Image (tube, rainbow, N blue to C red):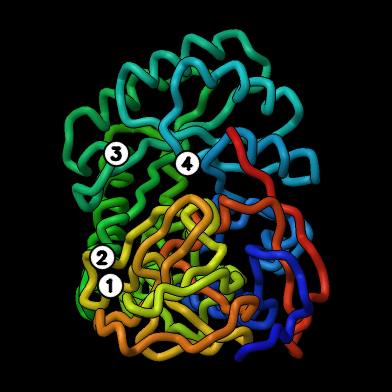
Amino acid sequence: MTTNALDAAETPRLLLDAARMQANCVRMRDRVRALGPRFRPHVKTAKSLDVTRAMLGAPTGPITVSTLREADTFASHGFTDITYAVGITPNKLAHARALVARGIDLTLILDSVEAARAVRDAVAGDARAPQVLIEIDTDDHRAGVRPDDPALLAIAAVLADGPARLQGVLTHAGGAYDCRGDDALRAMAEQERAGAVHAAQRLRAAGHAAPVVSVGSTPTALFARDLGGVTEVRAGVYVFFDLVMAGLGVCAADDIALSVETTVVGHRAEKGWTLVDAGWMALSRDRGTAGQPVDQGYGLVCDARGRPLDGFIVVAANQEHGTIAHRSGDPTRRLDLPVGAVLRILPNHACATAAQFDRYHVLDAQGAVAAQWPRFGGW
């Protein structure tokens, strides 16, 4: 535990266990295939061509993005079927139109008459236009119109017969992150499915096309028992998993493919602290496990090979310093490690932690860095 089996590299750096990642990808693809809909992975977590190809199991395919920067990057590498799954605003429509003009089949989402009018007016006269999905709120968690809301049909009416074709509905059950236990996750998956299907049925009954019924989150995709009426599933964080997912029971800690390698820089023995060079600039400030039964602080501490050290978490984080201590708070239970010893930290939220880095250091089956995969950020 006092030596670095991954070579004497500068830290912090972002490590990606290739075998775990591949297993996670196979698990999700197999699950969605068994349920029937097509799969449209969300690439906002990965922001990487290499990781996205692993998610798809193919060089290109349908993807979901959360920024137009992601859409641009993937479009430049042959991805032509892209859903931008953040509510569209007028100041992004020129960018969206430019993507369509490049030959991209771009789908936008919106949840208001105001946004629908903005899209309709912006693309009037365009030879090609983006497609549109109406975002549905199936769990009172974030954006969207409720499945029974009269606004659903009012939005559809604005888009009727215009160049921006209404294709159906999209929902994201973010409320799954508040579920506890398998039964609650299954119930949320069914709530998500039923709400989206009902909204699509209302559109069809009113004479509007709704061939697409898109649902998805990592927990609901993995816990759904039936996806009747759903045409596609979206999910993203499953590619790496994280401590929030482990806390929900969606994965085990041994499934988490992402970690931050860090080095011991000092000690405060009287407090039981071990100081490392991974602070919130490396780990992020995400405290997503704080509301779960087991609070993992800013991350779960592992040895240099990625094996969790029982009871040790990052209890505090400054910009470039992390403070490791035993979760009990007992200062006599501290890590007896010299300065220069290497550790790994499992993240609370893989999306937030990965966003702090510009590349993945990819580990092979022997735990050696076999490749570096670039990742990008920005909007």
Judge the density around disc 3: few (<14), some (14-19), many (≥20) Cα neighbours within 10 Å.
some
Q: Which of the image's four quarters has the N terminus?
A: bottom right
Discs 1/4, front: 1
Which residue is nearer to you in this view: 28 or 334?
334
Label 2 element class: loop
| Above or below for 42 versus 360 | above
**Image check: 351 left or right of 170?**
right
Q: Is residue 143 above or below residue 138?
A: above
Label 4 sits on residue: 85
Residue 232 visible at all: no
Disc 1 marks a residue whose amino acid type is: Asp
Residue plotted at (49% across, 18% down): 162
Task: Indicate the quadrant containing the C terminus: top left, top right, bottom left or bottom right.
Answer: top right
Residue hosting label 1 = 295
Helix, strand, or loop for circle 3? loop
Quick one: 188 or 105, which is closer to the camera? 188
Which residue carries the number 3 mark?
143
**Kind of residue at badge 4:** Ala
Which amino acid type corresponds to the residue marked 3 in the rendered image? Ala
